[in-house]
Amino acid sequence: GEQFRAGELPWSSVRELTRVVTWKTEQAWLDAIEDKTATDVQQMVRGKTKGALPTDPVDPTKLTYRIVLEGVSAEAYVMHKQARIAVANAASGSSNTDDDFVRAYASAVISPPAPADEPTRPPYQIAVTTCRECKKGHVVGAGIVEELTPQALERVQCDHEHIGDLESEELTRLRSEIPAPTRRKVFVRDKFQCAVPDCRSCRFLAIHHIIPRSEGGGHQLGQLLLLCDGHHKMLHDGVLSLRGRAPDQLVFDLPLDDDEN
């Protein structure tokens, strides 16, 4: 506080520090950010919990970005609000957070509609990186590399294409985790639609393994089903649970609406 009042710390740096600093860690943080810009401070606090020290490891579950839109016209603002309502109406029990909304509109732009009778490609690509021992996964794009949470990594491993070893000079053919004939059978069997009851989503579909790949789940048809991006995320985040065998012996445990609690 004294350094801020003395003009030694800009407000933007103080704002970032308040997210993590306590009276016990204040001096450690002030020492760590000496001569650092506000952008540097922002990067230092990202992924840290309240009370964490600058030297503590980053918690990937706490990594978030702040998106600010400015200069939006009235017409575009109305369209934005309409899109937000459309995502909420299609959420089918999802929380419709800012993260849900960004994922929905980004997927709409990045993933073009596929022909109605053709399975979509796997939504992710995976490469072997330098960190083979810790088994951590990272999302890479637009000049950004961010660590995935264990839940997100497991979701990616459900349905992806493997591009090969980034450290090897060997030319590697793009390989789908799930064989193409199996993929087509799952899409046709599930009618090119999310398998969650009452979800009518036919876009942004991924194949889910009922028994996770990390637990030895295979590509048998009875262990695979189609899920929309929203429900796939809910399942791996533990909001939605699933057991049984596809397609006729599936049991979903859906979250209750607020008025049912």
Image: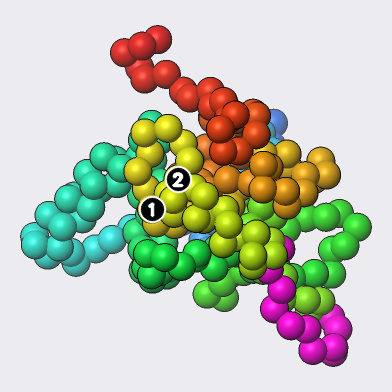
- Residue located 70% across and 78% down the image: 174
- Residue located 17% across and 50% down the image: 82
- Name the residue tied to disc 1: 202
In the picture, the disc for residue 257 is none
Q: Are marks 1 and 2 in contact (CB under 8 Å)?
A: yes
Give the magenta range. 167-177
Q: Whole-percent x and y of residue 198?
A: 36, 33
Could you tell whether 17 is left or right of 24 in the image? left
Q: Earlier in the sequence, mark 1 or mark 2?
A: 2
Residue 171 shown in magenta? yes
Q: Nearer the viewer, residue 31 or 243?
A: 243
Other-residue count near label 1 (Cα within 10 Å), few / some / many at <14 / 14–19 / ≥20? some
Could you tell whether 211 is left or right of 261 in the image? right
Could you tell whether 5 is left or right of 134 in the image? left
Report the Cα–Cα distance between label 1 and label 2.
6 Å
- Name the residue tied to disc 2: 194
Q: Nearer the viewer, residue 119 or 155?
A: 119
* Quadrant in the picture for the C terminus: top left
Q: What amino acid is found at the position of numbered circle 1 in the picture?
A: Cys
Please say if 93 is above or below 180: above
Colour style of the rendered protein structure:
rainbow
Q: Nearer the viewer, residue 51 or 115?
A: 115
